[in-house]
């Protein structure tokens, strides 16, 4: 079962992990969004610059056509056209015509360094435009050679401001910066967020967009607050849910335990009923066996020829006595179960001991065993229910006989009646093996037995009955060997006096 603290810390850790994940995802999303915006702006700018480059080509072509229109070139007209071009296209900061026929070459509009223009023109054939960076890379110089009569006398030069060429009304995403330059000058290895070559055959330019957006952009504070609140709320809900589930499973476990308890208790009751029924059967076995054996003896007698009816009398007496005893046992058991008061009378303990000994010896005794009754000469009278007291002595005697059945040497059970210290004492001693070690403490526990077919009810019942008569029952091992059980009962006079006092 998960403890509350453990569950809480797991939920808290999961919430923190979830919050972290939300931040990482949001950062990734922001990065993707920034990259997409940058790419879009880059493409727009790329398209615009490509168009502008085409315009440069167009201007160079028209100026070269104008230069070729007459010989010598109509410089005043060219100058006028150049002035209107630079007015309309502020990125074109200068237009020049260089006479290549003179030495050194001469700048006719005095805008560029004629030596540089001539050097570029020397490498350009009629149709090709040469492009180079000037003024520390802030400007581009485009040079086209104009052919007059097939001979290149003049070169047309355009000076373009790179910053203006790359300028646009289209707003770049926040933190983005456009860089435009000759492709061959672009720094190798420097990875721009967006980079593309301008689609111009004559001007090998490359546009790059750099951005200051960090690799892992921080999500906006509002997002962080909402995410933190949501994860906290989620964690709280999950915690409550887990707690409710834990409680439900605990309740189910308790219910299952309770059901099991109830089942066990029921089984216990059923068992106890069974034991009680067996106990009753156990008590009745002896008188019924006696009745059976006397009836069989009677049958045998009757079958003999010339038998006197009087000879049947002892057998019939024994049958009647045992049947009465069985009836009484049942009656007393019923009375005991219904907790009605015992039928108290003055009982002569010595006489009762003899009667029980007679009952015990009527059945078959274990082979080689004997039972004797001893009396110190006193005749202790006790106040008890006769049948119940008989039952006690009978049980103790039978236990003694059971015990001697296992004895190796002498097999004798002695029932002794005496008066000691103003008490009536009846003890049953045997020459058996004695009480097993673990039995001493549990003798009077119901259902405690060490016998294979035992019920463990005999001694519990004896103890209860003796206590009812105000006495005590003790069991132990005798010094000479074997077990000895002693019932101590108040003498009748004393019992009556005590009852009167109560
Ligand atoms: P049960 O005779 O059905 O076993 P009891 O309550 O009469 O039930 O006896 C309980 C147990 O006490 C016996 O199983 C036995 O171990 C022990 N016991 C009783 N009497 C004697 C005896 N005389 N000698 C040895 N053990 C005895």
Image (cartoon, helix red, strand yellow):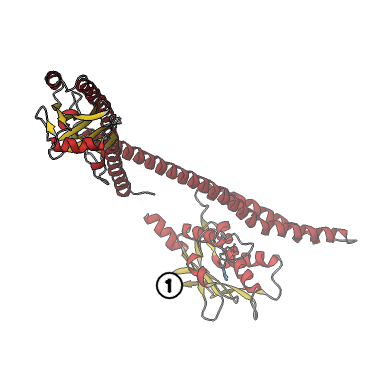
The quarter holding residue 310 reads bottom right
- Please report the residue visible at 41 percent of the width from the left and 56 percent of the height from the top: 499
Give the camera-side residue of 303 and 173: 173
The foreground one among 208 and 364 is: 208
Dot 1: element: loop
Residues packed near mark 1 inside 10 Å, few (<14), some (14 to 19) or many (20 plus): few
Answer yes or no: is residue 396 visible. yes
- State the image coordinates of residue 204 (x, y, percent, origin top left): 27, 35
Ligand 1 quarter of the rendering? bottom right
Number of numbered discs present? 1
The image shows residue 413 at horizontal and vertical percentages of 61, 73
Residue at the extreme left: 110
Rendered location of residue 218, percent (x, y): 21, 39
Q: Quadrant of the C terminus?
A: bottom left
Residue 346 appears anywhere in the view:
no
Residue underneath mark 1: 421
Of residue 397 and residue 481, the one placed in the foreground of this image is 481
Instruction: Name the residue: 54% across, 81% down.
Output: 480
Q: Can you give x and y, in whole percent of width and height, for residue 56 in the image?
A: 22, 25
């Amino acid at each position: 079962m998960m403890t509350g603290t453990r569950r809480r810390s797991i939920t808290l850790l999961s919430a923190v992990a979830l919050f972290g994940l939300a931040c990482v995802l949001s950062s990734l999303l922001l990065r993707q969004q920034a990259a997409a915006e940058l790419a879009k702006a880059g493409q727009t700018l790329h398209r615009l610059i490509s168009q502008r480059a085409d315009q440069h080509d167009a201007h160079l072509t028209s100026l070269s056509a104008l230069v070729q229109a007459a010989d010598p070139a109509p410089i005043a007209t060219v100058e006028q056209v150049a002035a209107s071009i630079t007015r309309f296209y502020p990125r074109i900061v200068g237009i020049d015509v260089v006479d290549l026929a003179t030495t050194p070459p001469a700048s006719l509009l005095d805008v560029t360094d004629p030596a540089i223009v001539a050097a570029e023109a020397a490498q350009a054939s009629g149709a090709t435009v040469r492009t180079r960076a000037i003024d520390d890379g802030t400007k581009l110089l485009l040079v086209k050679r104009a052919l007059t009569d097939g001979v290149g006398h003049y070169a047309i030069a355009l000076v373009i401001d790179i910053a203006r060429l790359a300028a646009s009304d289209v707003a770049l995403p926040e933190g983005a910066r456009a860089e435009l330059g000759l492709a061959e000058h672009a720094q190798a290895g420097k990875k721009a967020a967006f980079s593309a070559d301008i689609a111009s055959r004559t001007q090998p330019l490359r546009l790059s967009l750099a951005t200051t957006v960090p690799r892992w952009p921080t999500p906006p504070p509002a997002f962080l607050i909402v995410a933190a609140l949501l994860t906290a709320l989620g964690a709280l809900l999950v915690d409550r849910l887990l707690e409710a589930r834990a409680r439900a499973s605990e309740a189910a476990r308790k219910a299952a335990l309770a059901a099991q308890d109830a089942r066990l208790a029921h089984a216990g009751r059923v068992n106890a009923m069974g034991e009680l029924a067996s106990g009753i059967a156990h008590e009745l076995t002896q008188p019924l066996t006696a009745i059976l054996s006397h009836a069989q003896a009677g049958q045998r007698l009757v079958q003999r020829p010339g038998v006197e009816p009087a000879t049947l009398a002892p057998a019939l007496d024994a049958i009647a006595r045992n049947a009465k005893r069985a009836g009484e046992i049942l009656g007393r058991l019923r009375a005991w179960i219904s907790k009605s008061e015992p039928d108290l009378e003055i009982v002569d303990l010595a006489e009762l001991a003899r009667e029980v000994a007679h009952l015990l010896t009527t059945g078959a005794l274990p082979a080689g065993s004997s039972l004797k009754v001893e009396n110190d000469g006193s005749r202790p009278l006790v106040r008890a229910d006769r049948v119940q007291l008989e039952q006690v002595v009978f049980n103790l005697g039978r236990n003694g006989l059971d015990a001697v059945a296992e004895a190796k040497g002498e097999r004798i059970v002695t029932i002794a009646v005496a008066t000691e210290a103003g008490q009536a004492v009846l003890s049953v001693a045997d020459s058996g093996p004695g009480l097993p070690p673990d039995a001493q403490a549990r003798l009077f526990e119901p259902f405690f037995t060490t016998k294979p077919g035992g019920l463990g009810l005999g001694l519990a019942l004896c103890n209860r009955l003796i206590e009812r008569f105000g006495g005590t029952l003790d069991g132990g091992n005798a010094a000479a060997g074997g077990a000895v059980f002693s019932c101590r009962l108040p003498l009748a006079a004393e019992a009556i006096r005590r009852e009167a006092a109560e």
